[in-house]
Amino acid sequence: MAEFSYEIVKHIGTLSQSPKGWQKELNLISWNGRDPKYDLRDWAPDRQKMGKGVGLSREELSVLAELIANLDN
């Protein structure tokens, strides 16, 4: 498995927490020194392990926010 690095530039918020302490979080993360992206994934309590997630650009996050705002329409 290839090594990678990440830096949580900004913790935006926590959506939920499992009984085992894992938290689903939205963060701004720089992966392997690249420009930061908005990232939604599960994190272990010590943040040493993570689940699969999705990375979004600012534009994609804006579209997602609009889609969520219009769920009831």
Image (tube, rainbow, N blue to C red):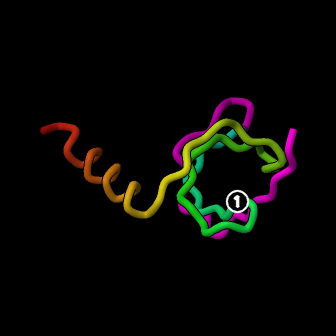
Q: Quadrant of the C terminus?
A: top left
Residues shaded magenta: 1-21
Q: Is residue 8 magenta?
A: yes
- Quick check: 60 above or below 16? below
Q: Viewer-proximal residue, 2 or 23?
A: 2
Q: Quadrant of the N terminus?
A: top right
Q: Viewer-proximal residue, 26 or 23?
A: 26
- Residue at 40% over, 56% down: 61
Residue behind mark 1: 31
Task: Please tell me how many numbered marks the rendered image carries.
Answer: 1
- Residue at 69% over, 64% down: 8
Outermost residue toward the left in this view:
73
- Quick check: 35 above or below 1? below
In percent of width and height, residue 30 lies at: 67, 64
- Residue at 43% over, 63% down: 58
Q: Determine the secondary structure under disc 1.
A: strand
Give the amino acid type for the residue marked by disc 1 in the picture. Answer: Trp
Q: Viewer-proximal residue, 4 or 15?
A: 4
Q: Quadrant of residue 53?
A: top right
- Horizontal arrangement in the rendering, residue 31 relative to residue 2 (left or right): left
Q: Is residue 18 magenta?
A: yes
In percent of width and height, residue 44 lies at: 76, 42
In percent of width and height, residue 37 lies at: 56, 61
- Horizontal arrangement in the rendering, residue 1 relative to residue 22 (left or right): right
User: Is disc 1 surrounded by few (<14), some (14 to 19) or many (20+) residues within 10 Å?
Assistant: some
Q: Viewer-proximal residue, 36 or 46?
A: 36
In percent of width and height, residue 60 lies at: 39, 55
Outermost residue toward the top in this view:
19
